[in-house]
Image: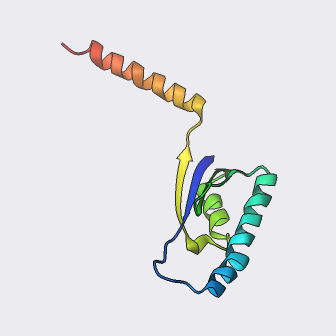
């Protein structure tokens, strides 16, 4: 199954101590990026950061929703991000489904008085 995963940094609103920011980058963000880079090298994800934003997006190949949930929740910065996950339908299935919808609509039109 393919999924589109989007992550956006949670805004805390208010000043933060630069020492806290450095610690968070070193202990959460960089290790998370390294895990994602490893997953990309393994062919499990494709994507990256969104230029100029504290956000990223990637496509994931996972056997189940549960596998994907485990993968994302094990990232060190999981709790610091807002996650949006959407299942993706292949183009071939989308074409077939759309053709079926058109046939159903044609049948409905043909049965109208």
The foreground one among 100 and 74 is 74
The foreground one among 50 and 71 is 50
Give the vertical position of 22 relative to 86 (above or below).
below
Q: Residue furthest left?
A: 113
**Whole-percent x, y for residue 74 in the image:** 67, 70
Q: Answer left or right for 89 relative to 48.
A: left
For residue 54, which quarter of the picture?
bottom right
Q: Answer left or right for 8 relative to 43.
A: left
Q: What scheme was used to colour the molecule?
A: rainbow
For residue 88, which quarter of the picture?
top right
Give the vertical position of 86 relative to 25 (above or below).
above
Give the vertical position of 46 relative to 35 (above or below).
above
Residue at 49%, 29% (x, y): give it.
97
Residue at 54%, 55% (x, y): give it.
85
**Whole-percent x, y for residue 98 in the image:** 46, 26
**Whole-percent x, y for residue 18 in the image:** 63, 84
Q: Quadrant of the C terminus?
A: top left
Task: Please tell me how many numbered marks the rendered image carries.
Answer: 0
Give the vertical position of 22 relative to 82 (above or below).
below
The foreground one among 99 and 42 is 42
**Whole-percent x, y for residue 4 in the image:** 58, 50
For residue 72, which quarter of the picture?
bottom right
Residue at 72%, 65% (x, y): give it.
33
Residue at 78%, 49% (x, y): give it.
43
Q: Answer left or right for 11 relative to 30.
A: left
């Amino acid at each position: 199954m393919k999924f589109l995963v989007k992550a956006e940094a949670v805004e805390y609103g208010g000043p933060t101590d630069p020492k806290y920011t450095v610690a968070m980058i070193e202990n959460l963000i960089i290790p998370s990026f390294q895990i994602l880079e490893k997953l990309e090298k393994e062919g499990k994800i494709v994507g990256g950061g969104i230029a100029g934003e504290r956000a990223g997006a990637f496509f994931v190949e996972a056997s189940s929703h549960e596998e994907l949930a485990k993968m994302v929740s094990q990232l060190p910065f999981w709790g610091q991000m807002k996650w949006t996950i959407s299942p993706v339908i292949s183009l071939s299935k989308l074409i077939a489904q759309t053709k079926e919808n058109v046939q159903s609509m044609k049948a409905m039109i043909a049965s109208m008085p």
